[in-house]
Image (cartoon, helix red, strand yellow):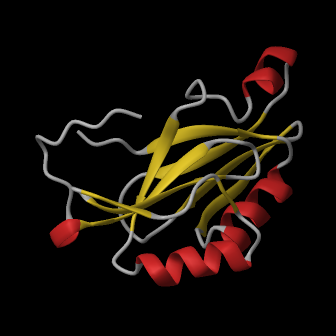
Amino acid sequence: MHLHAVTVLVDDYDTGIAHYVEDLGFRLIEDTDLGAGKRWVRVAPGPQGSCLLLAVASTDEQRAAMGRQSGGRVGFFLHTADFAGEHARLVARGVRMTEVPRREPYGTVVVFEDRYGNRWDLIEPVDGRIPDDFARQE
């Protein structure tokens, strides 16, 4: 078993695709018209692993949850082998950093927010990975 996708609420499919693909550097995996204004839209940061399923918020409750799906905590984690390059690219694309990059025992990290307010960690892990037994408080 593996985690295939995580739903992220967006305000509009095309705006969401543009943000994740153009600003964050993800790739569009699928954009299928389901009829009645609904689409199955998947984006991913790399060729393997889980993806995001972009879902347009269609109720007041969903719109209120957009960008706060993890209650204000970091909810998404991106690993990179080129922190400096990825960080510079995100800043150049206007992505909002909530802090300056810092070194932690597990690697170099910075928190940023996507267009919707979801908080992300961009991490270059020490030795390419974060130890399984490393517990971290947000």
Asked whether, in this view, residue 118 is left or right of residue 65, the answer is left
* Residue situated in front as seen by the camera: 79 or 138: 138
Left or right of 48 on screen, residue 71: right
Q: Quadrant of residue 35?
A: top right
The residue shown at (85%, 26%) is 58
- Location of residue 54 in the rendering, given as x and y in whole percent from the top left corner: 67, 46
Most distant residue in the top direction:
61
Residue at 20%, 67% in the rendered image: 126
**Relative to 134, does residue 20 appear above or below in the rendering?**
below
Question: Residue 12, percent across and down?
Answer: 86, 47
Q: Please give the name of the residue rendered at 71% of the width and 64% of the height, measured from the top-left corner.
A: 95
Q: Residue 124 location, x and y as percent?
A: 34, 68
Which corner quadrant holds the N terminus?
A: top left
| Callout count | 0
> Which quadrant of the rendered structure holds the C terminus?
top left
Instruction: Find residue 99 and report its image quarter.
Output: bottom right
**Which image quarter: residue 30?**
bottom right
Above or below, 15 relative to 117: below
Quick check: 89 left or right of 16? left
The residue positioned 58% from the left and 68% from the top of the image is 26
